[in-house]
Image: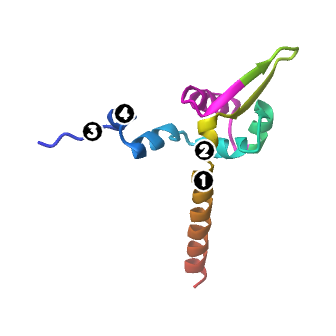
Amino acid sequence: MVRQTTLEERFGKCPYATAQSLISGKWAVLILLYLEDGPIRFNELLRKMPKMTHATLSVQLKDLEERGLVNRRQYDGIPAKVEYSLTEIGKKFHPVVAAMEAWGNEYIAQMQGETNA
């Protein structure tokens, strides 16, 4: 009997499993995309996200922060100001986002061509 290894068992050993695990959240890629332009406040990021709740964004940001892809910086004041930005390793995700954009555009064009044919 062949035993299947789980994603968790491959994390940190297999680059594909590691990358998949790090960006597994439904909104992770969009969050990383919006943070590419520099630090952004929570509510500003929330406005950019389509149909996302406050709680969901909070969970996704906390997860990305725990995984070392996002920085959270809180400034003293009333009300407290919190900004999110990419870490150095988070910034290195840009070529992946660019490749996903190119592939996504190609896929959309192909599907539109097939439906218009």
Q: Inspect the image, locate mark 3, and give the three-letter code of the amino acid beneath it.
A: Thr
The answer to whether residue 106 is above or below residue 100 is: below
Left or right of 109 in this view: 50: right
Which x, y percent locates residue 66?
Answer: 56, 26
Q: Residues within 10 Å of mark 3 (few under 14, many from 20)?
A: few
Indicate the secondary structure of the residue bearing disc 1. Answer: helix
Q: Which numbered disc covers residue 95?
A: 1
Pointer 4 or 1: first along the chain: 4
Q: Nearer the viewer, mark 4 or mark 1?
A: 1
Pick the quarter of the image with the N terminus. top left
Q: Which residue shows up at 47% across the image and 43% down it? A: 19
Q: Residue at x 87, y 14 (%)?
A: 77
Distance from Cα at disc 4 to Cα at disc 1:
25 Å
Dot 2 or dot 4, earlier in sequence: 4
Q: Which numbered marker is on residue 5?
A: 3
Disc nearest the viewer among 2 and 3 = 2
- Whole-angstrom CA distance, mark 3 to mark 4, is 8 Å
Say which residue label 2 marks.
92
What is the three-letter code of the residue carrying label 4? Answer: Glu
Disc 2, disc 3: CB below 8 Å?
Answer: no
Check whether the beta carbons of the residues at disc 2 and disc 1 lie within 8 A of each other: yes
Q: Are marks 4 and 1 in contact (CB under 8 Å)?
A: no
Magenta span: 49-72
Residue 30 in the image, given as x and y percentages of width and height:
65, 46
Marks 2 & 4, CB-CB < 8 Å contact = no
* Residue drawn at point x = 50 percent, y = 40 percent: 24
Residue 18 drawn at (x, y percent): 43, 39
**Residue sitting at x 72%, y 31%:** 84
Tell me the element at label 4: helix
Quadrant that contains the C terminus: bottom right
Q: Nearer the viewer, mark 3 or mark 1?
A: 1
**Residue at mark 2 to residue at mark 4: CA–CA distance:** 23 Å
